[in-house]
Amino acid sequence: MEIFKEENFRIPLDSPDAFINREMSWLCFARRVLNLAEDPEVPLMERVKFAGIMGMIYDEFAMKRLGGLRRLIQKKNNDSLRTVSNPLKSFSYVGRN
């Protein structure tokens, strides 16, 4: 079939769809760990471990990722940065989720 040819699935490298937003990816990973910590099917000690990992993930996220986004926003030269997503948009999106 024509629709399943490989060239139909190629994404141009200059397209924003070719890149993953690090902050959103980090939060998705954190959500998966939180789901494991809340899952009653997981043994209690494993859930406690996942809860501890969850705390470390959010601490590092707040210190590294949010701090980095704040610095990029303060530079105010977001157009010259070689990033796909706008730091201000990422920062506001993270605050809502």
Image (cartoon, rainbow, N blue to C red):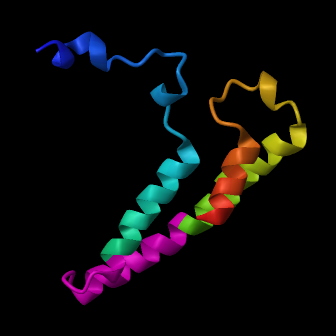
Please give the name of the residue rendered at 44% of the width and 57% of the height, measured from the top-left corner.
28
Q: Is residue 94 left or right of residue 54?
A: right
Residue 5, percent across and down?
19, 13
From the top left corner, tell me how far across and down residue 34 is, in percent.
40, 73
Give percent across and percent down for residue 29.
42, 57
> Which image quadrant for residue 35?
bottom left
Residue sitting at x 52%, y 64% = 57
**Magenta region's main secondary structure?**
helix
Q: Which residues are magenta?
A: 37-57
Q: Is residue 47 above or below residue 8?
A: below
25 relative to 87 in the view: left or right: left
The one of 16 and 38 positioned closer to us in this rendering: 16
Residue sitting farthest toward the left? 1
Which residue in the rendered view is the most extreme toward the front?
2
Q: Quadrant of the N terminus?
A: top left
Tell me: residue 82, above or below residue 76: above
The quadrant the C terminus occupies is bottom right
Who's the residue at 38% across and 68% down the image? 33
Residue 45 within the magenta-colored segment of the rendering: yes
